[in-house]
Image: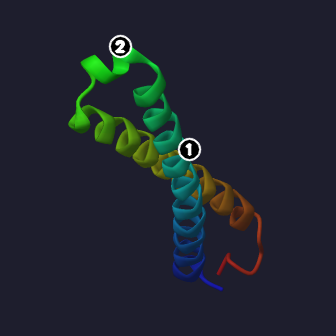
Amino acid sequence: MGHKEAQAECIREGTIYAVKASGVAAVISTIATLGAVRYVPWVTKNINYTGRALIISAATLGTFIITSEQTILECGRRHYDDPAVKS
């Protein structure tokens, strides 16, 4: 396996893990945001629909970026010492 194949594998692996993690983060942040809207009067009065959507999407996007970066770096470290990649 050459450098290009190892790079493609790391990117693919990072994307898959990031999509899974961001899906979980989207569900959790949606439940927390909608629960806060229902039970906390201040949130209902002061955060409109756009603000609620931004809270959910920010949590999802942040999780995607952090997870993909960490996974790609970990995969790169794993392949750095692999003699099959060094050509």
Tell me the element at label 1.
helix
Q: Nearer the viewer, residue 69 or 83?
A: 69
- Place of residue 74 in the rendered image (x, y in percent of width and height, measured from the top left): 67, 55
Residue under the point 35% across and 13% down = 42
Q: Which residue is mark 2?
A: 42
Q: Nearer the viewer, residue 36 or 54?
A: 36
Color encoding of the figure: rainbow
CA gap, disc 2 to disc 1?
21 Å
Residue under the point 44% across and 34% down = 33
Residue under the point 27% across and 18% down = 45
Residue located farthest toward the bottom when viewing the structure as drawn: 1
Residue located farthest toward the top when viewing the structure as drawn: 42
The image quarter containing residue 80 is bottom right
User: Which of the image's four quarters has the N terminus?
Assistant: bottom right
Q: Amino acid at mark 1?
A: Ile
Q: Nearer the viewer, residue 41 or 2?
A: 41
- Place of residue 56 in the rendered image (x, y in percent of width and height, measured from the top left): 40, 42
> Tag 1 or tag 2, which sits nearer the N-term?
1
Say how many tags the image has: 2
Residue under the point 52% across and 45% down = 66
Tell me the element at label 2.
helix
- Place of residue 87 in the rendered image (x, y in percent of width and height, measured from the top left): 65, 81
Crowding at dot 1, Cα within 10 Å, few <14 / some 14-19 / many 20+, comes out as some
Q: Nearer the viewer, residue 87 or 23?
A: 23
- Place of residue 22 in the rendered image (x, y in percent of width and height, measured from the top left): 51, 54
| 81 up-or-down from 35: above or below | below
Q: Nearer the viewer, mark 2 or mark 1?
A: 2
| 60 up-or-down from 51: above or below | below
Q: Amino acid at mark 2?
A: Trp
Q: Which residue is mark 1?
A: 28
Q: Residue 39 has which mark? A: none
